[in-house]
C-alpha cells in the first residue's frame, strides 16, 4: 500500500494513458470525420484525465446508438399511421407551377430520398422579423386555437414573454384545447412554479433528455435545438427565435440592452403536416408513451396560396445529415448568388470548400456574422475561417448593431432557408434541428431585401485589414480552431 501511495500519480497517469490508447483506437476504428477525430485524440493525450472527461461528455456516441434506437422504434411503429396523411400522393400538386422547383430539383429529390419529406405547394408563408413580430403573431394564433397547441423549443424561460405564453396556454387549456409542450432541459430556465402551473392546467409538458448539473453541461451532446409551434395542425412556426426575453426588443427596454436580430417563419398549409410529424415523434420519445394520432392533427387544408415548402429535420437519430446535405446541395447548385446569415460559422470541410469554390466560380457569396456574438470561443473559432473565405472572394460582413441570431440563406432569387440550424458541427451532426426550404420567388425577393437592410448595419471585412489583426488574436483563433469540431 505504501508503494502504491508513494507512486500514486505515476499509477494514475499510467492508467489514464492505458485508457487513452484504448479510446484512441476505438475512435480511429469508427471512421469519423478525420478533423474531429484528430481534435479528440489531441485532447486525450495532451490533457490527462481532463481529456477523458471531455471525450465522455462531448464525443461519446453510446447514447446515439442506444437511446435513439428506442426513438427509431417509435418512428417505425407510428410512421405508417400518419404517412398517408402527409400528402405524399396528393394529385392536386401535379398541375401547379413548378418553375422554382425545376431550378432546384436536386435539392427536392435529396430531401425526398433522405427523409421522404414531400415538397408541398398549398402553403402561405409569412416572414417574421425579430421576436416582437414573431410573438405577436404566435400569441394571436394561439388565442384562436380550437383543438390543440404543440410547442417545442430549445429555450423556454420564465420571464416576461415566457410568463405571458404560459398564462395564454393555461387559458386555452381551460377552454378545452389540448396542449403539449416540449422544452430542452439544459438550455431552458423554467421555474418549478411555472411547470407546476402548466401541469395543474392540464398541459402535458416534458423536458427533452434531463441531465445532472445542467449548468455545467450546457454544451452536452444531443440537445433539441428546434424552435417550433403547431396550432390546430394547419398553422406552424419555425425559425431561430426562442421563448426568452433576450430575443425581444421591447420599446421600453433600456438602451444598453443588446439589440437582437432574428428571423422566424409562419406557415399556413400542408407543410405544417411535416412539422406536426416531427413534433409527434419527439413527443413520443420524451414522454415515454405513444401518443394516439388523431385526424385533427392532420386536418384537410385547402388554401389559395401556392408557396412551395419542404421541411428538413436532422439529428442524431437520422441516417443522414439532412440539413447539412441540403445546404451543401443549395451551395453547389447556385448560379447567381448565395446570401447567408448565421450567428455561428464553424463549418465542416464540405461547406467551407463549397462556399469558396462557389465564389471562385463566379457566384456572389455573402455571409453576415456577429461582430462579437455571445460566445468568446465560438467567435475566435469563426474568425479562424475568415481568411480563407476572403482569399476566395467570399464577402464577409460583421453585424455591429447587436446580436444577429438569424439562420437564413437565400439562393438565386428562388430558394430560401429559414430554421434553427447554424453553420457549425453541433447543428450539422449533434443537435436536433429543423429548417424550412421555400421554393418561391416572392419569398426569396422579400428575404433578399431583408438581407440588404441587414447589410446596412454591418462592416465589410477586407483581406488587407484582416491580415493586419494582432498576433495574439491569431493565436487565440488557432487554439479555438482546435476545439471547433467539439463546439
Image (spheres, helix red, strand yellow):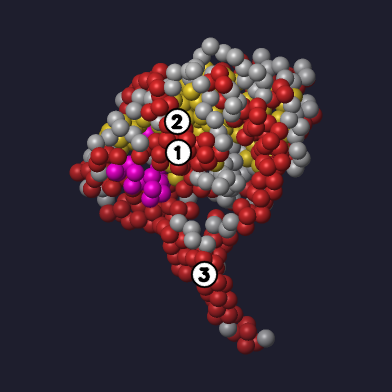
Give the position of the N terminus as an image quadrant.
Answer: bottom right
Residue at mark 1? 326
Above/below status of 6 relative to 269: below
Helix, strand or loop at label 1? It is helix
The stretch of residues the image draws in magenta is: 340-357
Residue at mark 2? 417
Residue 25 is labelled as 3
Please give the name of the residue rendered at 31% of the width and 53% of the height, measured from the top-left corner.
474
Helix, strand or loop at label 2? It is strand
| CB within 8 Å, label 1 to label 2 | yes
Residue 137, by quadrant, is top right
Please give the name of the residue rendered at 53% of the width and 24% of the height, measured from the top-left corner.
120
Q: Is residue 301 magenta?
A: no
Left or right side of 114 for 359: left
Task: Measure the alpha-carbon separation of dots 1 and 2.
Answer: 10 Å
Nearest the camera: 320 or 35? 320
**x, y percent for residue 222:** 59, 48
Nearest the camera: 27 or 214? 27
**x, y percent for residue 152:** 63, 33
Above/below status of 382 relative to 20: above
Q: Residue furthest bottom?
A: 3
**x, y percent for residue 279:** 64, 33
Task: Measure the alpha-carbon separation of dots 2 and 3.
Answer: 39 Å
Amino acid at each position: 500500500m505504501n508503494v502504491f501511495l508513494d507512486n500514486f500519480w505515476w499509477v494514475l497517469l499510467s492508467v489514464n494513458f492505458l485508457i487513452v490508447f484504448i479510446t484512441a483506437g476505438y475512435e480511429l476504428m469508427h471512421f469519423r470525420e478525420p478533423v474531429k477525430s484528430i481534435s479528440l485524440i489531441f485532447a486525450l493525450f495532451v490533457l490527462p484525465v481532463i481529456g477523458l472527461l471531455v471525450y465522455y461528455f462531448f464525443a461519446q456516441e453510446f447514447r446515439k446508438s442506444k437511446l435513439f434506437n428506442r426513438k427509431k422504434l417509435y418512428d417505425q411503429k407510428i410512421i405508417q399511421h400518419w404517412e398517408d396523411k402527409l400528402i405524399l400522393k396528393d394529385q392536386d400538386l401535379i398541375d401547379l407551377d413548378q418553375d422554382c422547383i425545376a431550378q432546384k430539383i436536386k435539392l427536392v429529390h435529396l430531401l425526398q430520398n433522405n427523409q421522404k419529406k414531400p415538397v408541398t405547394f398549398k402553403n402561405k408563408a409569412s416572414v417574421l422579423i425579430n421576436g416582437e413580430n414573431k410573438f405577436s403573431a404566435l400569441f394571436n394564433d394561439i388565442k384562436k386555437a380550437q383543438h390543440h397547441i404543440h410547442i417545442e423549443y430549445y429555450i423556454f424561460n420564465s420571464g416576461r414573454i415566457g410568463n405571458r405564453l404560459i398564462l395564454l396556454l393555461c387559458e386555452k387549456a381551460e377552454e378545452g384545447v389540448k396542449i403539449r409542450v416540449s422544452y430542452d432541459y439544459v438550455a431552458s430556465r423554467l421555474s418549478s412554479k411555472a411547470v407546476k402551473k402548466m401541469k395543474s392546467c392540464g398541459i402535458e409538458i416534458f423536458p427533452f433528455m434531463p441531465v445532472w448539473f445542467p449548468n455545467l453541461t450546457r454544451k452536452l451532446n444531443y440537445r433539441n435545438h428546434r424552435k417550433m409551434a403547431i396550432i390546430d395542425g394547419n398553422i406552424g412556426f419555425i425559425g431561430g427565435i426562442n421563448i426568452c426575453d433576450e430575443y425581444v426588443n421591447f420599446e421600453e427596454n433600456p438602451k444598453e440592452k443588446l439589440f437582437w436580430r432574428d428571423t422566424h417563419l409562419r406557415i399556413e398549409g400542408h407543410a405544417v403536416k411535416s412539422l406536426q410529424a416531427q413534433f409527434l415523434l419527439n413527443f413520443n420519445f420524451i414522454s415515454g408513451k405513444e401518443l394516439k394520432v388523431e385526424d385533427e392533427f392532420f386536418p384537410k387544408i385547402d388554401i389559395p396560396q401556392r408557396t412551395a415548402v419542404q421541411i428538413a429535420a436532422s439529428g442524431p437519430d437520422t441516417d443522414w445529415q439532412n440539413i447539412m446535405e441540403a445546404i451543401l446541395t443549395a451551395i453547389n447548385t447556385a448560379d447567381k448568388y448565395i446570401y447567408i446569415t448565421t450567428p455561428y460559422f464553424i463549418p465542416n470541410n464540405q461547406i467551407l470548400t463549397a462556399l469558396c469554390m462557389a465564389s471562385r466560380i463566379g457566384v456572389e457569396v455573402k455571409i453576415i456574422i456577429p461582430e462579437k456574438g455571445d460566445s468568446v470561443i465560438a467567435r475566435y473559432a469563426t474568425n479562424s475561417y475568415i481568411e480563407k473565405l476572403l482569399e476566395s472572394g467570399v464577402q464577409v460582413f460583421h453585424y455591429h448593431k447587436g446580436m444577429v441570431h438569424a439562420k437564413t440563406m437565400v439562393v438565386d432569387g428562388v430558394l430560401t432557408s429559414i430554421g434553427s440550424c447554424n453553420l457549425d458541427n453541433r447543428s450539422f451532426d449533434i443537435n436536433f434541428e429543423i429548417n424550412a426550404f421555400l421554393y418561391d420567388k416572392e419569398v426569396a425577393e422579400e428575404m433578399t431585401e431583408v438581407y440588404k437592410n441587414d447589410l446596412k448595419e454591418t462592416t465589410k471585412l477586407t483581406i488587407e485589414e484582416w491580415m493586419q489583426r494582432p498576433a495574439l488574436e491569431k493565436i487565440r483563433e488557432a487554439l479555438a480552431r482546435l476545439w471547433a469540431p467539439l463546439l
